[in-house]
Each structure stands twice: as C-alpha cells, then as structure tokens.
Image (cartoon, rainbow, N blue to C red):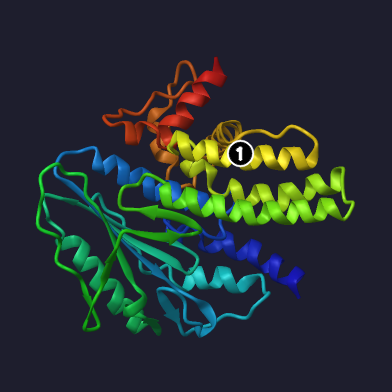
Amino acid sequence: MKTLERLVLAQLRCLVSSSLDPLQFAYQPGIGADDAVIHLLHRSLAHLETAGSTLTDRPQYVRTQGCVSDRVICSTGAPQGTVLAPFLFTIYTADFSHNSTQCFLQKFSDDSAIVGLITDGDDKEYRGLTQDFVDWCQLNYLQINASKTKELVVDFRRHKHPPLQPLNIQGMDIEAVDSYRYLGVHLNSKLDWTHNSDALYRKGQSRLYLLRRLRSFGVEGPLLKTFYDSVVASAIFYGVVCWGGSISAGDRKRLNRLIRRASSVLGCPLDPVEVVSDRRMVAKLSSLLDNISHPMHETLTTLSSSFSGRLRHPLCGTERFRRSFLPTAVRLHNKDFN
C-alpha cells in the first residue's frame, strides 16, 4: 500500500505544486525544519535592522488526530503511518496563506507561526491576519486552543515604549512570553540563543551518559561511533545551521566540552561545534541555491554575481544580523570559492 501511495504522491505533487503555499516547509524535497527557522529568523532580523522596528511572533501549533498540543488542536485527523496523509494535510491547509512585507504566515505541516514585522507600533495588519486565521480555522474544522497560544515580542528600540495591547482570541487574551520552542529550537525575546544552548547542553549531557553506559558494556569501535552520531551528536548539533554563527563564546565552550568528553569515551577525535557549524552552513547554502522552490532562493539570487559566481555579502548594520545564518554562510561560501 505504501508503494502505491508513493506512486500516487509523485503524480499528485506535480499536479498541485503550483497551488501549494510557498511558505509550507514540510514534505518538500530538500527542505526541513532548519529551513523554516532560518526563514523566520532572516526576515525578522532584516526587519529589526530598521529604526522603530518591533517583531511580534505568535506560534500556532496544529496536531492531527485531535490530540491536544501545546498550541492548537486539529480535529480533522490523519491515519498514522501513511505516505499520502501528511501531504494531503498540506493541500487541505494550502488555501490560507499570507506573505507581505509586514506580516507572513509560515507553516511546517501542522505547525504554523504568524509573524508581524511592526514599525512605529502599527500592528493593524498583524491583528487582522490573526483574526482571519482564527476565522478560517473555524470554517475548516480546526479548533484553536487559545489558552495554549503564546506571543513573543522582540523589541530592540532604545527608548521605552508602552507594551503592545494583547491580542484576544475567542474571548481570551493571549499570553506574552519571553521564550518558546519552535520546531525544536528555543527562541527568546533577545534572540541570543541562551535558552537554546542550555537545552542542548542538558540533552547532550543525558545522551553522553548513555554513551558511557554503552561503553561500559564493552561496545566499542564503529558501533559506538554510530551511536554517538545518531544519538549524542544529533542532540548537540540540532539546528546548528540556525545558531552556529550566533552562539556566544561561553555557550560554544560548554558544548565543546561535551564533545571532548565524548571523544575520550570513543577514543578518537571529534569535530568541535564551529567546524560542524561551518560545514553544515555551506552545505545548506548550496542546497538553497540549487532549490528554486525554496522561499529564500530569490533572496540568494539577488546576491549572486553573474561574473565571478561569488555571492555579494548582505548589508548588515548590527552584529546580531551579521552573525546570523545568511551573512555567515555567504562569507564561508566566498571563502571556499577562493
């Protein structure tokens, strides 16, 4: 049955690809959760470069099978273990999309985030988009759990301004938070990766304990290295292309200590965070350049030089933007190009 579904999916994808939401990052060839986080951060940081800017981000989370999630409930459901069900869900939700210079709605299968790029306190479009999304969910049998919906506001303006008025969904004011977990990556109102680094360090420590226990049972050699790559390294380096260039020196040292401990258990050298980060950033940038359907492909095309094949470095006014994915990856790409 799954083989038959894959045959149908290959034909179905070609037929409906032009109608899919361009900001749907799930179930697309060569696109994953890292791409969704990179897109959200790049547009947010680029907006925050301008004066009088505020970022408001409201994550909406949809679960199939009617299960209560941390943000939204989806009552439609989908059979588990099938090939077509996830893609059919993206088709079902493709008719609601929004992408303007001030607001956009991006999705990862049943995860959605409404992002408002607000200037001088004008959040009219942001509020209107949120209400339209709520109305659309009600019309399409998607029940939003307003009590689980959170809002994150990033405001780097020097002068103090009154806080934004809370949004009200279904008669309930939405709670403003300082941090939340989006697609496995922890974001906070300072965009400094401290919460994410703490989470990675704790998870890396627990996985390192398992590595040591396995070593105590006499497992060694390639099998132990495979366990490190699949269990320990996958936790430490999760989303590294998103935070690798922006992580603080102290947090980088902490993660590298974990890697050195794992190296002593394995008895072989392991690449530190900065090496893995640089390598994966260059690979991700190459993937974006080759994928014309990627939402950030057009951005990279405008940076490409028709003469040398190099990429022009994006204009960066702040260190925060300069150390983000795109400027860092472009710098590494041009370095390797030389």
The residue under the point 48% across, 51% down is 198
The residue under the point 40% across, 65% down is 112
Q: Which of 283/185 is in front?
A: 185
In the rendered image, residue 306, in percent from the top left (x then y), is placed at 44, 21
Q: The C terminus appears in which quarter of the rendering?
A: top right
Q: Quadrant of residue 231?
A: bottom right
Q: Which residue extends farthest front?
A: 216
Q: In the displayed structure, would residue 118 be above or below residue 157?
A: below
The amino acid at mark 1 is: Arg
In the rendered image, residue 197, in percent from the top left (x then y), is placed at 48, 48
Residue under label 1, please give it. 257
Camera sees residue 289: no
Q: Which of 280/269 is in front?
A: 269
User: Relative to 192, is 203 on the left or the right?
Assistant: right
The residue under the point 57% across, 80% down is 78
In the rendered image, residue 302, in percent from the top left (x then y), is placed at 37, 31
User: Relative to 41, is 258 on the left or the right?
Assistant: right
